[in-house]
Image (cartoon, rainbow, N blue to C red):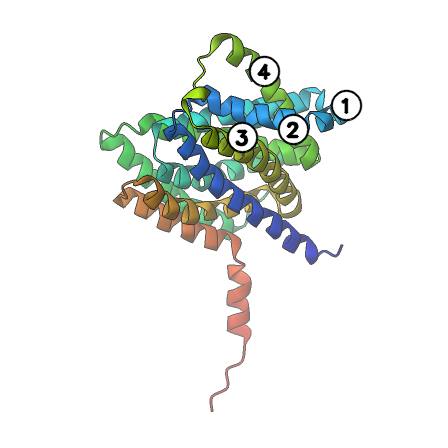
Amino acid sequence: MTQDTLPLKGLAYALAAVAIWTGFILVSKAGSLASLALPDMMMVRFGTAFVLFSPFIWQHRAAILQWRMLVLGLIGGLAYALSVFNGFANAPATHAALLLPGLMPIMIAVFAYFVAGERHSRASWLGIFLSSLGIMALLIETFTSGSQYWLGDSSFVLACIFWGIFTVLLRRWKFAPWQATLGIIAVTFSLFAPVYVLFLPHHILDATWQMVGLQAFYQGVMATTIQMVCYGRAVHLIGATRMGSLMALVPVFASSLAVPLFNEAWSLGLTIALVSILLGTLIGNLPISRILYRISSTPYYYK
């Protein structure tokens, strides 16, 4: 494979992850509205994945049974999922669509700089800065308007912190994406399932079997497994920072679909956040300096 095809292949994996993550936001919010509580969502997500992929988990047990994989599972599996599902239970899908993929590039860039030693271009930092302005506008609106969404928004922020750490560690420790995915499933299920069965309330029977089936398929297969593999491959091929920036494309699709699907209100803070994140994504990912150079060096002929 040539050097030129690597970014293209990485971009394809990244766009697949973007599409699946958009669906994850919508499906997760639908589940929280269908009487599925946070513990139920966790159990459906990781229980389904564990049952389906247990033969592969056993096959790769040597790679999974090590302390680094335990750390990845605790951060990118258990801590992230608990935070994000608590967010869905306490905030609209539009907030999730903007905060999760909008704040992740910021967290990933910071941790990549200090932990993995990645250096970012001026265009990347400018894109991150613009996205940060939009995120701040939405958070300020939430915390100053007396909205009850502050707990959900805070949970989304915490989830982004966990995901940023996980992404950088995944790249630094160079686990194969498939092994990392299996490790996260195994670690999270092993730690959470006993607590769920013995101590936590169960509301799965309160939802329809269609909703439970949808959650099992999307959470346990698409979001937990396929999306993780695509995300991990993209991180290895195009870098953690660029992958994080491309995830900011999710708000365009998720927020535009969440409003009609869940009858959610739109606000000024959401508008500012969406525009800022889009601008930040474009500036952070497009080769602006190369484009400007080509424009300035192109001869103009007037007829």
To which residue does mark 1 refer?
62
Instruction: Report whether residue 174 is seen.
Output: no
Residue neighbourhood size for the residue with mark 2, other residues' Cα within 10 Å, grouped as few (<14), some (14–19), many (≥20): few
Q: Earlier in the sequence, mark 2 or mark 3?
A: 2
How far apart marks 2 and 3 lie (CA) works out to 11 Å
To which residue does mark 2 refer?
52
Q: Are marks 2 and 3 in contact (CB under 8 Å)?
A: no
Residue type at tag 3: Ala
Residue that lies at the very extreme toward the front in this rendered image: 209
Numbered badge on residue 44: none
| Residue 227 pos. (x, y %) | 58, 39
To which residue does mark 4 refer?
191
Closest to the observer: 141 or 127?
A: 141
The image quadrant where one finds the N terminus is bottom right
| Residue 189 pos. (x, y %) | 59, 20
Residue neighbourhood size for the residue with mark 4, other residues' Cα within 10 Å, grouped as few (<14), some (14–19), many (≥20): few
Q: Are marks 1 and 3 in contact (CB under 8 Å)?
A: no
